[in-house]
Amino acid sequence: MRALMVGLSGLVMACGGASTEPAPSEPAVEPAPAASTSTPAPQAAEPSEAADAKEEPTDWLDVEAMTAAFAGAQVVGGARASAWEVDGSTVRVDDGSGAVERTLEFRSPCTVAVKDEESGSSTIHVYAVGEGVRYLGLGAAGVLVEEHTIVACAGGKSYVIDTLELECETWDERFGRWRRGEPEPTCTFENDTLTIGHYEMSLTAPGVYLTSQLASAQVVPHPDFATAQAAL
Protein backbone atom coordinates (compact mmCIF):
# COMPACT_ATOMS: atom_id res chain seq x y z
CA MET A 1 0.00 0.00 0.00
CA ARG A 2 1.15 3.57 -0.62
CA ALA A 3 1.97 5.61 2.43
CA LEU A 4 -0.27 8.59 3.15
CA MET A 5 1.45 11.93 2.77
CA VAL A 6 0.61 13.13 6.27
CA GLY A 7 2.62 16.32 5.95
CA LEU A 8 0.47 17.58 3.12
CA SER A 9 -2.70 17.03 5.12
CA GLY A 10 -1.36 19.34 7.83
CA LEU A 11 -0.63 21.92 5.17
CA VAL A 12 -4.21 21.71 3.96
CA MET A 13 -5.58 22.32 7.45
CA ALA A 14 -3.26 25.30 7.95
CA CYS A 15 -4.43 26.96 4.80
CA GLY A 16 -8.12 27.13 5.49
CA GLY A 17 -9.47 24.49 7.81
CA ALA A 18 -11.98 22.03 6.42
CA SER A 19 -11.87 21.30 2.71
CA THR A 20 -14.78 22.53 0.66
CA GLU A 21 -16.87 20.19 -1.41
CA PRO A 22 -16.57 20.65 -5.18
CA ALA A 23 -19.47 22.01 -7.17
CA PRO A 24 -22.08 19.42 -8.18
CA SER A 25 -21.34 17.46 -11.32
CA GLU A 26 -23.19 14.92 -13.39
CA PRO A 27 -22.76 11.22 -12.50
CA ALA A 28 -19.88 9.67 -14.40
CA VAL A 29 -20.87 8.10 -17.71
CA GLU A 30 -18.84 5.10 -18.82
CA PRO A 31 -18.96 4.63 -22.61
CA ALA A 32 -19.43 1.25 -24.19
CA PRO A 33 -16.17 -0.64 -24.82
CA ALA A 34 -14.90 -0.36 -28.38
CA ALA A 35 -15.45 -3.41 -30.54
CA SER A 36 -12.29 -5.46 -31.04
CA THR A 37 -11.36 -6.72 -34.50
CA SER A 38 -8.90 -9.31 -33.23
CA THR A 39 -8.61 -11.70 -30.33
CA PRO A 40 -5.97 -10.43 -27.86
CA ALA A 41 -3.41 -12.89 -26.54
CA PRO A 42 -4.02 -14.03 -22.95
CA GLN A 43 -2.15 -11.92 -20.40
CA ALA A 44 -0.72 -13.20 -17.17
CA ALA A 45 -1.94 -11.52 -14.00
CA GLU A 46 0.39 -8.88 -12.63
CA PRO A 47 2.35 -10.52 -9.82
CA SER A 48 1.84 -7.66 -7.34
CA GLU A 49 -1.93 -7.78 -7.76
CA ALA A 50 -2.33 -11.57 -8.09
CA ALA A 51 -0.43 -12.16 -4.85
CA ASP A 52 -2.53 -9.74 -2.82
CA ALA A 53 -5.71 -10.97 -1.16
CA LYS A 54 -8.66 -8.64 -0.60
CA GLU A 55 -7.03 -5.54 -2.01
CA GLU A 56 -9.30 -4.25 -4.78
CA PRO A 57 -12.38 -2.24 -3.70
CA THR A 58 -14.71 -4.87 -5.13
CA ASP A 59 -13.22 -7.52 -2.82
CA TRP A 60 -15.33 -6.13 0.02
CA LEU A 61 -18.55 -5.97 -2.04
CA ASP A 62 -21.53 -8.15 -1.14
CA VAL A 63 -23.67 -7.91 -4.28
CA GLU A 64 -26.57 -9.91 -2.87
CA ALA A 65 -26.79 -7.75 0.25
CA MET A 66 -26.67 -4.50 -1.75
CA THR A 67 -29.24 -5.75 -4.26
CA ALA A 68 -31.55 -6.66 -1.38
CA ALA A 69 -30.97 -3.27 0.29
CA PHE A 70 -32.15 -1.43 -2.84
CA ALA A 71 -34.98 -3.81 -3.80
CA GLY A 72 -38.35 -2.24 -4.51
CA ALA A 73 -39.54 1.26 -5.43
CA GLN A 74 -37.77 4.39 -4.27
CA VAL A 75 -36.71 7.92 -5.14
CA VAL A 76 -32.94 8.40 -5.35
CA GLY A 77 -30.57 11.22 -6.22
CA GLY A 78 -31.53 13.94 -3.77
CA ALA A 79 -31.99 17.27 -5.59
CA ARG A 80 -31.61 15.49 -8.95
CA ALA A 81 -34.22 12.90 -8.19
CA SER A 82 -35.16 9.80 -10.16
CA ALA A 83 -37.69 7.08 -9.47
CA TRP A 84 -36.23 3.59 -9.30
CA GLU A 85 -37.74 0.15 -9.04
CA VAL A 86 -35.16 -2.56 -8.44
CA ASP A 87 -35.92 -6.22 -9.09
CA GLY A 88 -32.74 -8.27 -8.91
CA SER A 89 -30.31 -6.87 -11.45
CA THR A 90 -33.06 -5.03 -13.34
CA VAL A 91 -33.97 -1.45 -12.52
CA ARG A 92 -36.73 0.71 -13.98
CA VAL A 93 -35.63 4.34 -14.00
CA ASP A 94 -37.61 7.53 -14.54
CA ASP A 95 -35.94 10.91 -14.16
CA GLY A 96 -39.12 12.68 -15.19
CA SER A 97 -38.73 12.02 -18.91
CA GLY A 98 -40.32 8.57 -18.93
CA ALA A 99 -39.53 5.11 -17.60
CA VAL A 100 -36.73 3.02 -19.10
CA GLU A 101 -35.38 -0.40 -18.14
CA ARG A 102 -31.71 -0.75 -17.28
CA THR A 103 -29.31 -3.22 -15.68
CA LEU A 104 -28.04 -2.54 -12.17
CA GLU A 105 -24.40 -3.45 -11.51
CA PHE A 106 -22.84 -2.90 -8.09
CA ARG A 107 -19.15 -2.25 -8.71
CA SER A 108 -17.83 -1.59 -5.18
CA PRO A 109 -19.14 -0.90 -1.66
CA CYS A 110 -19.81 2.69 -2.79
CA THR A 111 -20.34 2.70 -6.58
CA VAL A 112 -23.19 1.28 -8.63
CA ALA A 113 -23.64 1.37 -12.41
CA VAL A 114 -26.90 1.74 -14.29
CA LYS A 115 -26.23 0.14 -17.66
CA ASP A 116 -28.03 0.65 -20.96
CA GLU A 117 -27.72 -2.79 -22.56
CA GLU A 118 -28.61 -1.44 -26.01
CA SER A 119 -25.82 1.15 -26.18
CA GLY A 120 -23.47 -0.56 -23.73
CA SER A 121 -22.87 2.68 -21.81
CA SER A 122 -23.21 2.99 -18.03
CA THR A 123 -23.91 5.81 -15.60
CA ILE A 124 -21.95 5.46 -12.35
CA HIS A 125 -23.52 6.57 -9.06
CA VAL A 126 -22.00 6.90 -5.58
CA TYR A 127 -23.99 5.24 -2.80
CA ALA A 128 -23.69 4.11 0.81
CA VAL A 129 -25.74 1.93 3.14
CA GLY A 130 -25.60 2.19 6.92
CA GLU A 131 -27.97 0.59 9.44
CA GLY A 132 -30.91 0.54 7.04
CA VAL A 133 -30.36 4.10 5.80
CA ARG A 134 -29.41 4.42 2.13
CA TYR A 135 -27.82 7.30 0.25
CA LEU A 136 -27.34 7.67 -3.50
CA GLY A 137 -26.46 10.75 -5.50
CA LEU A 138 -23.67 13.21 -6.19
CA GLY A 139 -20.75 13.62 -3.84
CA ALA A 140 -18.36 11.18 -2.16
CA ALA A 141 -18.68 8.32 0.31
CA GLY A 142 -16.48 6.17 2.50
CA VAL A 143 -17.65 2.86 3.99
CA LEU A 144 -16.00 0.98 6.85
CA VAL A 145 -15.71 -2.53 5.39
CA GLU A 146 -13.74 -4.10 8.22
CA GLU A 147 -11.89 -2.88 11.29
CA HIS A 148 -9.42 -0.13 10.29
CA THR A 149 -10.28 -0.40 6.56
CA ILE A 150 -12.43 2.07 4.62
CA VAL A 151 -13.34 1.84 0.94
CA ALA A 152 -14.10 5.30 -0.42
CA CYS A 153 -15.44 6.61 -3.75
CA ALA A 154 -14.70 10.20 -4.75
CA GLY A 155 -14.12 12.07 -7.97
CA GLY A 156 -14.50 9.01 -10.18
CA LYS A 157 -11.87 7.02 -8.31
CA SER A 158 -11.94 4.45 -5.51
CA TYR A 159 -9.67 4.26 -2.49
CA VAL A 160 -8.73 1.60 0.05
CA ILE A 161 -7.66 3.27 3.27
CA ASP A 162 -5.92 1.63 6.22
CA THR A 163 -6.83 3.95 9.09
CA LEU A 164 -4.48 2.20 11.52
CA GLU A 165 -1.32 2.26 9.41
CA LEU A 166 -2.28 5.56 7.75
CA GLU A 167 -1.96 4.13 4.27
CA CYS A 168 -4.12 4.83 1.24
CA GLU A 169 -4.32 3.18 -2.19
CA THR A 170 -5.93 4.72 -5.23
CA TRP A 171 -7.79 2.44 -7.65
CA ASP A 172 -9.26 2.97 -11.11
CA GLU A 173 -11.94 0.70 -12.57
CA ARG A 174 -12.56 0.48 -16.28
CA PHE A 175 -14.89 -2.08 -17.85
CA GLY A 176 -14.63 -4.37 -14.85
CA ARG A 177 -10.84 -4.31 -14.50
CA TRP A 178 -9.20 -2.67 -11.47
CA ARG A 179 -5.74 -1.09 -11.52
CA ARG A 180 -3.82 0.92 -8.96
CA GLY A 181 -3.72 4.59 -9.85
CA GLU A 182 -1.51 7.53 -8.93
CA PRO A 183 -1.31 8.33 -5.19
CA GLU A 184 -3.60 11.02 -3.78
CA PRO A 185 -1.47 13.64 -1.97
CA THR A 186 -4.19 14.62 0.52
CA CYS A 187 -5.82 11.53 1.96
CA THR A 188 -6.29 11.75 5.73
CA PHE A 189 -8.47 10.28 8.45
CA GLU A 190 -8.82 11.94 11.84
CA ASN A 191 -11.56 12.94 14.28
CA ASP A 192 -14.17 10.88 12.38
CA THR A 193 -13.45 12.89 9.23
CA LEU A 194 -12.11 11.37 6.01
CA THR A 195 -10.52 13.79 3.55
CA ILE A 196 -9.54 12.83 0.00
CA GLY A 197 -8.38 15.73 -2.13
CA HIS A 198 -11.11 18.36 -1.91
CA TYR A 199 -13.71 15.89 -0.65
CA GLU A 200 -14.38 16.00 3.08
CA MET A 201 -16.53 13.17 4.42
CA SER A 202 -17.93 13.21 7.94
CA LEU A 203 -19.28 10.30 9.98
CA THR A 204 -22.98 10.32 9.03
CA ALA A 205 -24.10 6.86 10.17
CA PRO A 206 -22.18 4.04 11.89
CA GLY A 207 -19.35 3.16 9.53
CA VAL A 208 -20.51 5.59 6.81
CA TYR A 209 -18.64 8.79 5.89
CA LEU A 210 -20.33 11.21 3.48
CA THR A 211 -19.88 14.64 1.98
CA SER A 212 -22.69 17.03 2.91
CA GLN A 213 -23.95 16.81 -0.68
CA LEU A 214 -24.40 13.05 -0.56
CA ALA A 215 -25.70 13.14 3.03
CA SER A 216 -28.65 15.19 1.73
CA ALA A 217 -29.44 12.52 -0.91
CA GLN A 218 -31.11 9.95 1.33
CA VAL A 219 -33.05 7.29 -0.58
CA VAL A 220 -36.81 7.54 0.02
CA PRO A 221 -38.76 4.25 -0.24
CA HIS A 222 -42.21 4.10 -1.85
CA PRO A 223 -44.85 1.35 -1.97
CA ASP A 224 -44.70 1.07 -5.77
CA PHE A 225 -43.08 2.58 -8.86
CA ALA A 226 -46.07 4.74 -9.74
CA THR A 227 -45.97 6.39 -6.32
CA ALA A 228 -42.24 7.01 -6.68
CA GLN A 229 -42.81 8.58 -10.11
CA ALA A 230 -45.53 10.84 -8.70
CA ALA A 231 -43.11 12.05 -6.01
CA LEU A 232 -40.67 13.53 -8.54
Image (cartoon, rainbow, N blue to C red):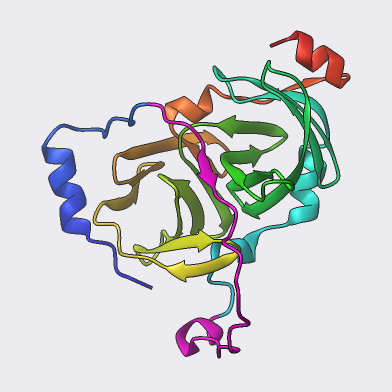
Give the tally of numbered discs.
Answer: 0
Along the line of sight, the residue nearer the viewer: 149 or 178: 178
Any magenta on residue 47? yes
Any magenta on residue 87? no
Q: Is residue 35 above or below residue 130?
A: below
Q: Residue at x 56, y 88 (%)?
A: 43
Q: Is residue 17 above or below residue 28?
A: above
Q: Residue at x 79, y 37 (%)?
A: 91
Q: Residue at x 50, y 55 (%)?
A: 150
Relative image position of residue 201 (x, y in whole percent): 41, 38
Task: Determine which quarter of the picture holds residue 102.
Answer: top right
Residue furthest to the front in view is 37
Along the line of sight, the residue nearer the viewer: 117 or 48: 117
Q: Is residue 21 above or below residue 170?
A: above
Relative image position of residue 9 (x, y in whole percent): 21, 50
- Which image quadrant: the C terminus? top right
Q: Is residue 124 above or below residue 3?
A: above
Task: Determine which quarter of the picture holds residue 108.
Answer: bottom right
Along the line of sight, the residue nearer the viewer: 31 or 52: 31
8 relative to 153 in the view: left or right: left
Relative image position of residue 20 (x, y in whole percent): 28, 30
Along the line of sight, the residue nearer the viewer: 43 or 128: 43
- The answer, for residue 148, to whether it is visible in the render is no
- Which image quadrant: the N terminus? bottom left
Q: Residue at x 52, y 67 (%)?
A: 178
Residue furthest to the top in view is 230
Relative image position of residue 37 (x, y in whole percent): 60, 74
Which range is magenta? Answer: 24-52
**Mostly what secondary structure, the magenta segment?**
loop
- The answer, for residue 94, to whether it is visible in the render is yes
